[in-house]
């Protein structure tokens, strides 16, 4: 469930409703892929579902604080240099990004 907040004037922003995303439970991860059907960040032990399974628990709070290739501390994400360079390492991701741009999606 994702909270939806609505701005209102002169009152402050307020929670108006929740939206259930992906009610069919379709996964983005292939069971025969490198993460064996798990979320890539779950696979890298960045987070995990709680024992009761009702909320995510952060396991490695500082995971995104350092660049994996140099261990340099990240003070600000540079979209083109950091995100796109990281994502473009994967052939699947290269194809996905190509399809996005071909279909007119602006990043």
Image: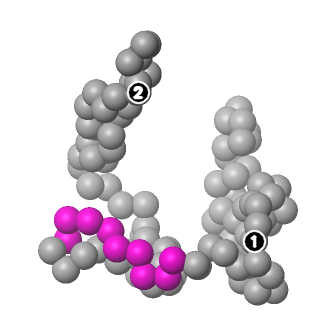
Lower position in the chain sequence, tag 1 or tag 2: 2
Say what secondary structure mark 1 lies in: loop
- Above or below 38: residue 12: above
Q: Where is residue 74 in the image (x, y as percent from the top left)?
A: 75, 71
Please provide the residue range marked out in magenta: 53-61
Instruction: Tell me the quadrant of the picture where the C terminus can be found.
Output: top right
Q: Distance between the residues labelled 1 and 2?
A: 32 Å
Q: Residue furthest top?
A: 9
For residue 33, say whether it is visible.
Answer: no
- Above or below 90: residue 5: above
Q: Where is residue 76 in the image (x, y as percent from the top left)?
A: 76, 61
- Pointer 2: what residue? 13
Q: Give the foreground label among 1 and 2.
A: 2
Say which quarter of the image contains residue 57. Answer: bottom left
**Visual colour scheme:** one colour
Say what secondary structure mark 2 lies in: loop
From the viewer's side, name the closer residue of 25 and 71.
Answer: 71
């Amino acid at each position: 469930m994702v909270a939806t907040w609505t701005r209102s004037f002169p009152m402050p922003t307020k929670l108006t409703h929740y939206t259930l995303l992906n009610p069919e439970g379709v996964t983005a991860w292939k069971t025969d892929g490198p993460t064996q059907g798990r979320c890539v960040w779950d696979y890298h032990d960045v987070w995990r579902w709680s024992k009761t399974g009702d909320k995510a628990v952060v396991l490695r709070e500082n995971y995104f604080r350092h660049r994996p290739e140099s261990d340099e501390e990240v003070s600000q994400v540079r979209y083109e240099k950091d995100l796109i360079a990281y994502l473009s390492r994967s052939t699947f991701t290269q194809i996905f990004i190509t399809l996005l741009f071909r279909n007119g999606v602006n990043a």
